[in-house]
Amino acid sequence: MSSDVDICNLALARLGDEANVVSISPPDQSAQAGYCARFYPMSLSAVLDEHNWGFNSKLVTLALTTNPSSLWDYCYEVPSDMINVIALYDSTAVGDVNYGGFPSNATTSSIYGDGSKASYLNRLATHGNQQDYSVESDTDGNVILYANQQNAMLKYAAYTTNTAVFPPSFIDALAWKLAANLAGIMIKGDIGVSASMKCMQAYAMALKAAKDSDSQNRKVFPIPAPAGIAARA
């Protein structure tokens, strides 16, 4: 299991450094530890924001708050660790696709579109039980979520510093991202700029590999159309 210090030392090693940082929280007496303490959190945030990773996905029931809107029926508080929304569901949803039947308040047009089998399957595969929403800020700067769904459940990407849940491919990408951010301050002039660009190229490849690996951890298939809809195709 890699720690934040291990990831920092990996990034430093990729820049040709001795990579012997002992602590970044608080940083030890080395300049490298100070740099890592400054750039590791922002590098982590950036990589977490690149993709809806499985390891930091959470599903919670939202709490209502008061902030009226003429466009939406309900207003919810969002989790303090939320990076971004993955999906909003009806609280009775089984999963990403509608295994439990259609919502009781749904209209024929909202489910079937033009009434064809293709339209039905396309909407089911694309949306399933997912609900419309809008993430905004109120007048006090608090982040809130508007929706028309009562008792909404939120699936979201959470900010986490727990390296124990980071897959190896994610760690590899994060170390390259951190190395790119450290290069300019540790290697001066054009050489540092060049080193940062090379690290970013390596980061792009590592990020793709990490995304591909993460995508294998979850598969969701839409259910077939009901017989009555299939017969209308």
Image (cartoon, rainbow, N blue to C red):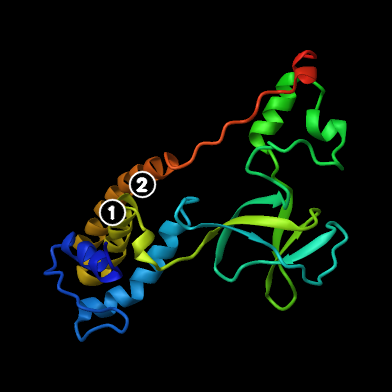
Looking at the rendered structure, the secondary structure element under dot 1 is helix
- Disc 2 marks a residue whose amino acid type is Ala
Between 187 and 17, the one nearer to me in the picture:
17
Give the amino acid type for the residue marked by disc 1 in the picture.
Asp
Residue 227 in which image quadrant:
top right
User: In the image, what residue occupies the spot 68% across and 75% down?
Assistant: 141
Q: Position of residue 75 (x, y in %)?
A: 78, 64
Q: Badge 1 local density, few (<14 within 10 Å), some, or many (20+)?
A: many
Q: Nearer the viewer, residue 105 or 39?
A: 105
Q: How far separated are the C-alphas under marks 1 and 2?
A: 8 Å
Give the residue displayed 74% in from the left and 16% down from the top.
Answer: 230
- Residue 70: percent from left, percent from top: 88, 60
The residue carrying mark 1 is 172
Q: Secondary structure at mark 2?
A: helix
Q: Are marks 1 and 2 in contact (CB under 8 Å)?
A: yes
Task: Please say if 28 is above or below 8.
Answer: below
Image-based side of 44 in relation to 117, left or right:
left
Q: Residues within 10 Å of mark 2 (few under 14, many from 20)?
A: many
Q: Is residue 205 above or below residue 118?
A: below
- Residue 1: which disc? none
Which residue corresponds to mark 2?
210
Give the number of callouts: 2
